[in-house]
Amino acid sequence: MVDAGRSGAAGGRAGRAPLLAVCTGYFMVILDVTIINVAVPEVGRDLGASLTGIQWITDGYTLVFAGLLLTGGALGDRFGHRRVFCAGVAVFTAASAGCALAPGTVVLVGARLVEGLGAALIVPGSLALLQQAYPDPDARSRAFGLWGAMAGVAASAGPLLGGLLVSTLGWRWVFLINLPVGAACLALTLRHVAPSPRSTARPLDLPAQAAVVAAVGLVTATLNEAGRRGWTDPLVLTAAGLAAVAAAAFVLRERTARAPAVPLGLLASRPTGGGATIGLLFNFGFYGMVFTASLYFQHQRGYSALGTGLALFPAVAMTMFASALAGRLARRTGHRPLVVTGMLVASAGLAGWAAAGPDPAYPVLVVPMMAAGFGTSFALTGTTSTVMTAAPAGYAGTSSAVLNTARQLGSATGVALGGTLLATAADYGAGLRTSMAVGAAAYLTAAGLARLCVPAGRG
């Protein structure tokens, strides 16, 4: 049972403690997504990694993260979200130490995969624990807004902190920074977050979990290897075909399973299925932009790692307050207009970059980057609330995992496709503009889906 004293209003002193504990873990996970972007060129030079290797250092984390989120959510629903959340923090922190000590690319990629496992245990529990701690709709909306804002803080701190660490102490400190954060998160969670209820009657659907891991991994591998081998290479086509088979196997399994990992009715509902698709699209646009822009600023403009972090700061700084602002405005307007507006603003931003020409002055790129960062974060709170409010009893972790699986798959495919476009285009600038145009189209599609899938009312 939830301790009422620990589940108070979000504005109360006691009520802020669970939020701080949960958001510390989420901060660490998102920091590791963005902090690596400015570090990978230096990592690549130090370890002799190819462009494909650099993509795997970035995407190895996100593909395991995305592939195992459903497993993490199901484990939390079954064994209690606080227990699984704490286990994830411990795994993530230990894997970060492994990344920092890696002697070569293969070991680093392996440690990043284990980090992804830890992240997959942390994130579904973070939303489920907030839903548990803040049952009042207004308090929950504020908590989700601050959860989203924490992602913005981490995204903002990542490029700057990564650039500073790489320029001063070296790229290994990009991972060592997680050790004190992880220790603080464990201490806060064990002290301030109440134990979670368990649903041990529902068994884990291991075949479905395996199908999701296979589908996510094969999609990411297809996009990564297409940049090196070409889209018509037999291995690339085989991986794409196997990804489709794995996805079909997941659907077939969920249709026939007595206790499906994700009931197909849940996926088919507009709030859950539509919200997850919107999350996939805006993560695709935003993280694809951050990855390709990082490479562009360093390889084409000769910026240092710290200079690249400063160059990206306008985009990620907007995320620092957009989610919190959306959480407050939603009580007046409802979530739908905010999600639609955010996606249109972000689409306009990336379209502006795509239209800016082959070598625009840096100030010309500031507004497009700010628009993408603001729009993405502005839509996050409404998308999260839409999915979590629609979660059936006992499926909070699963619904959180569906949303975050889609989002991380969007991140992985955005990075992979962006790298592929840079590698296969006639020149770096043309590949970058094409990547931005594709991201703008993704945001525009998300705006249309939001009109259909995000409820119009408040709450």
Image: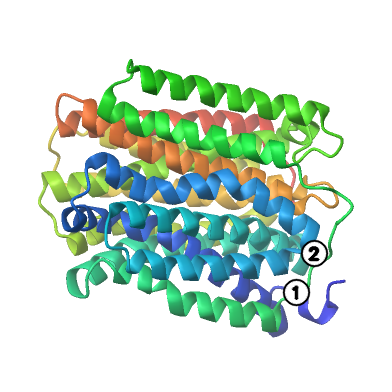
Q: Residues within 10 Å of mark 1 (few under 14, many from 20)?
A: many
Residue 421 spot, x, y in % from top left: 28, 29
Q: Secondary structure at mark 1?
A: loop
Question: In the image shown, does 109 or 356 lie closer to the viewer?
Answer: 109
Residue drawn at point x = 12 percent, y = 44 percent? 300
The number of callouts visible is 2
Q: Position of residue 77 (x, y in %)?
A: 77, 56
Residue that carries the numbered disc 2 in the rendered image: 136
The span from disc 1 to disc 2 (Cα, nearest Å) is 8 Å
78 vs 404: above or below: below
> Would residue 424 be seen by someone viewing this image from the given angle?
yes
User: Where in the figure is residue 107, as x and y percent of width and height?
Assistant: 35, 56
Is residue 385 something that shows in the picture? Answer: no
The answer to whether residue 189 is above or below residue 309 is: below
* Residue to which mark 1 is pinned: 9
Question: Which comes sooner in the sequence, label 1 or label 2?
Answer: 1
Task: Work out which quarter of the rendered image holds the N terminus and state it.
Answer: bottom right
Q: Position of residue 435 (x, y in %)?
A: 31, 32
Q: Say above or below: 334 vs 307.
A: above
Amino acid found under the numbered disc labelled 1: Ala
Is there a contact, CB below 8 Å, between mark 1 and mark 2?
A: yes
Q: Residue at x 56, y 76 (%)?
A: 185
Q: Secondary structure at mark 2?
A: loop
Q: Quadrant of residue 169?
A: bottom left
Q: Is residue 426 left or right of residue 412?
A: left
At label 2, which amino acid type do we have? Asp
Front in this rendered view, residue 428 or 240: 240
